[in-house]
Amino acid sequence: MAPRTPFRKRTHAAPDAPNSAADDLDRFDSIQCEKCRSGDCPDELLLCDKCDRGFHIFCLRPILVSVPKGLWFCPSCSADKKPKRESTLDPVSSLSLSLYIYIYIYTHTLSRSVGLFAEFPLVQTKIVDFFRIQRSSAGEETSGCRKRKKRNGGLVMAKKKRKLLPFNPIEDPNRRLEQMASLATALTATGAVFSNELTYRPGMAPRSANCARLEKGGMQVLSKEDNETLNQCKKMMEMGEWPPLMVVYDPLEGFTVEADRYIKDLTIVTEYVGDVDYLKNREHDDGDSMMTLLSATDAPKSLVICPDQRSNIARFINGINNHTREGKKKQNLKCVRYSVDGECRVLLIANRDITKGERLYYDYNGSEQEYPTEHFV
């Protein structure tokens, strides 16, 4: 990671810039972040090399992990450099063409700011390949949207029966691109790769160990209708229709997730995924992102999900401090384990309506009360 400095050094000084150190300090003290209007955290405040405006690295969208080296331009000045796209292209083609334009500006800066990586992988692979998005023709995309809209309506009408709802992606492909880029930033900065499924690795628990009937006290079965909704969400993500979520960076909480549009109660937000291993192999693991997958009657058969190497956005959703009333009020998701076709799966589901810009939280403990959360913000 690049060393932090109060302000980035400029390559070329302005002709009439004052030379005294006192004048420079006075000018720096007056600079505020254009997003939060604060001059706090000066070691994380960037100056645009074109317009001289200031931005905190954690206020930018997508966020930057650290202060970049070399020239840096704010989003407005960067946008002026982007060529115009053809408006007659289908959504998938338009998304593909805009990827290189956006990624070049975004990842070219990020690759210099993350010192742990010699080269940021998205520079060469594009986001459609990073997330393994399937390409389809305009006709297929339009037809799929019509089918989904019809199904969405049926699910909304059936809400009184407490059926789960599919997430509602944002229509703008460029905004979905920003959402995916924010997740790619967090995954790459934490040394993980994207996966949207449970994975079974050699030396860990085999898939045959994931048997829901071993659950102590039994596990609730996901209904046929809700299973179809879950599969619908998976299919939408494969086609590049992303959940309306943005990964952001908070100085206190680190990477966290906020809603990028209104999310309705009972919406499937995401599935918790990662490598599946036996709990007995991870009892002394100090990772804070492990999730219970199977709490077996026979304890040695209990399983956990380990998202440190392969994961999706669920890894960055924070937990509440369930020891305080204020912490409990922040909860807007519930973590539910289901039996799906005989296997254990973990879903994060909205337990109330969530407004745009609201950060997502759930109770890490549920009814177990084993994970210490007193230190949570």
Image: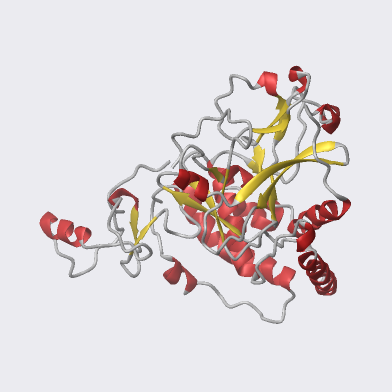
Q: Is residue 312 visible?
A: no
Residue sitting nearer the eye, 21 or 257: 257
Q: Which residue is drawn at 53% across and 72% down?
A: 82
Task: Quarter of the image for the C terminus: give it.
Answer: top left
* Residue 373 percent across, percent down from the top left: 50, 34
Colour mode of the rendering: secondary structure
* Residue 21 percent across, percent down from the top left: 13, 55
Apparent side of residue 30 relative to residue 33 in the rendered image (left or right): left
* Residue 152 percent across, percent down from the top left: 78, 67
Residue sitting nearer the eye, 24 or 350: 350
Q: How many labels does the image show?
A: 0
Apparent side of residue 100 relative to residue 60 in the rendered image (left or right): right
Residue 177: quadrant of the picture? bottom right
Judge whether 293 appears above or below 72 on screen: above
Judge whether 68 appears above or below 35 on screen: above
Residue 291: quadrant of the picture? top right
Residue sitting nearer the eye, 58 or 106: 58
Q: Which residue is drawn at 84% across and 51% down?
A: 227
Judge whether 312 appears above or below 59 on screen: above
Residue sitting nearer the eye, 150 or 324: 324
* Residue 88 percent across, percent down from the top left: 71, 82
Apparent side of residue 301 relative to residue 363 in the rendered image (left or right): right
Q: Is residue 352 visible?
A: yes
